[in-house]
Amino acid sequence: MKNRFKHRRRKKLKRKIRIGISIFLLITLSVGVYLAFQVYQTAKQSYSELDRADGISELRDTKVDIGNEPISILLLGIENYSSDGKGGRADTQVVLTLDPDSKAVTMTTIPRDTKVDISGEKVGDEYAGSHKINAAYTYGYLSDYGAQTLAVETVEDLLNIPIDKYVAVDFEGFHDIVDAIGGVKVDVKYPFWEENFYSNERVYFEEGVREMDGEEALAFVRMRKRDINTVYSRDERQRQFIKATVDEVKSAGTIFEINKISNVLKENVETNLKPGEILALQRTFPSLGSKSIETKEIQGTTPDVAGPSYFIPDPSQLDILKEELKDSLNLS
């Protein structure tokens, strides 16, 4: 009798466990489908193709199979507050390479003052010549060549690798995305202050881990005129922030803010990544975190001379970086 009673209890317990697992799987599946739908709808509205033949870089023979082959993505942070949302400068430029086989990811920050040459064939004689690389976006817009197209091609010329995709986000988008994901925790290496872009009040950053909202994060990544910038550069802080954001977006709680994030992305982000390509990257790199990202730098100097203050890459170090990036894309 006791054995029969125990047997019934075990059957009920197993049934409850099966029901519980089924409910959990249903909820998980529903969230996954909902997220995929939101990503698809958002990506459709943010999509903006580059003006180039067959939709691929001149440095590629065939279109890259996203999710199955290594890919490069240029992240552009656009400062367009002084141009009424038109044109602007690409003051943040970061090249990502992602290898689906090894799951290796590299991140290379391009200094905004890097000296580059822009040809008159692309922008006309009025805008041709030597410029800081952040102005390529501007002259692409002013000349009708295409802001994103010229920014991408100028980075390709600098690094001698194909840039397959780009993602451009403006000031408001940066600010709102940080707030939408509930802030980002960054380990501040050196104390400094920077003006709040919106209120002109000082934002003080003390050494140590700090959770930043949109306004604070913008001040953190923008600072470049304080003395501390020589040892704690803007490029380094941008890399820090991107890694911290990757970890934040991975957190489970972020999915409940997907509506806010989607609305921000629709209004402030442009990309030539198609919805299906975004989902393919999500499937290929489901557990991407900051520790998975290898950071690379462009070595060089900023000579103290009359006229524009250009960053000049070290030729031999730049050649080494080019080969490393080609290796990461399996192009060597």
Image: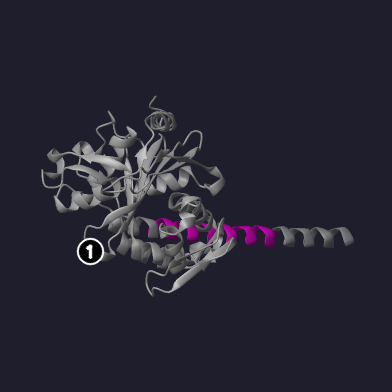
Residue 127 x %, y %: 15, 47
**Residue at point 41%, 63% (across, down):** 177
Q: Does the magenta stretch include residue 129?
A: no
Name the amino acid, label 1.
Ser
Q: What stretch is highlighted in magenta?
A: 15-37
Residue 254 x %, y %: 50, 62
**Residue at point 50%, 57% (across, down):** 249
Q: Which of 84 and 148 is in front in this view?
A: 84
Q: Nearer the viewer, residue 164 or 300?
A: 300
* Position of 272 relative to 298 (above/below): below
Magenta stretch, main secondary structure, is helix
Label 1 sits on residue: 83
* Position of 208 relative to 240 (above/below): below
Residue 270 x %, y %: 29, 55
**Can you name the residue that lies furthest to the right here?**
2
Q: Quadrant of residue 304?
A: top left
| Residue 199 visible in the snapshot | yes
**How many numbered markers are drawn?**
1
Question: Secondary structure under badge 1?
Answer: helix
